[in-house]
Image: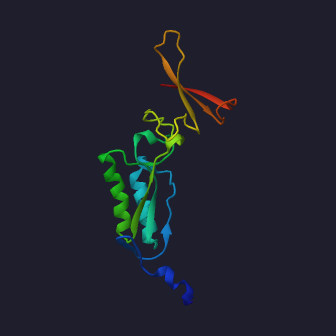
């Protein structure tokens, strides 16, 4: 069955700034569940998309600073030179099939709880992480034992559905 001529434009190269995509099929950034923990799996998935004909293949969200740690969720990181090689695996897998590689740079602001890095959050308005209220509290009588506690499933000022203690 021949292609409808109205769709021919989808298969034409398109210039995007200084580069040219082989066609107009743009795979938008989406999470995979692989993140920085499984760079080879992420690269293989994106390579398969490029092999399948996508003109531009994008990664999932990529944190640009340790103050934007979204743990325990899977996400990419570009925090230091050590992060370049794993991201290059994905770019190489995409480029191997003639497609362009894109990356979604991300800073979570008040949405990032920084559970892994434990660095203070950065946002235009200083406030606790809005999804998981991370607060440092002293639970010992001697003042030497600190814990982080998380109120999950609740908004600030409302009763928590689930309170868990995590060693700090």
At a point 39% along the width and 52% down the height, the residue shown is 39
**145 on left or right of 93:** right
Q: How is the image coloured?
A: rainbow
Query: Horizontal and vertical percent for residue 128?
Result: 55, 34
Quadrant location of residue 133? top right
Quadrant location of residue 95? bottom left
- Note whether 142 is above or below 27 in the view shown: above
In front here: 124 or 116? 124
Query: Horizontal and vertical percent for residue 165?
Result: 56, 25
- Note whether 98 is above or below 82 in the view shown: below
**27 on left or right of 80:** right
- Note whether 20 is above or below 133 in the view shown: below
Does residue 117 appear in this view?
A: yes
At a point 50% along the width and 83% down the height, the residue shown is 9
Query: Horizontal and vertical percent for residue 42?
Result: 43, 56
Image quarter hosting the N terminus:
bottom right
At a point 46% along the width and 38% down the height, the residue shown is 122
Count how many numbered circles sit on residues in the image: 0
Does residue 3 appear in this view?
A: no
Outermost residue to the top:
142
């Amino acid at each position: 069955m021949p292609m409808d001529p109205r769709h021919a434009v989808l298969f034409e190269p398109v210039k995007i700034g200084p580069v040219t995509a082989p066609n107009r099929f743009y795979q938008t950034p989406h999470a995979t569940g692989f993140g920085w923990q499984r760079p080879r799996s992420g690269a293989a998935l994106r390579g398969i998309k490029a092999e399948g004909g996508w003109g531009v293949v994008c990664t999932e969200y990529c944190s640009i600073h340790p103050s934007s740690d979204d743990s325990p969720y899977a996400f990419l990181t570009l925090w230091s030179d050590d992060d370049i090689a794993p991201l290059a695996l994905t770019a190489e897998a995409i480029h191997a099939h003639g497609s362009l590689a894109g990356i979604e740079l991300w800073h979570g602001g008040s949405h990032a709880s920084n559970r892994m890095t434990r660095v203070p959050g950065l946002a235009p308005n200083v406030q606790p992480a809005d999804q998981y209220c991370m607060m440092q509290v002293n639970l010992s009588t001697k003042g030497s034992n600190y814990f982080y506690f998380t109120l999950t499933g609740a908004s600030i000022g409302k009763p928590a559905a689930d309170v868990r203690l995590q060693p700090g």
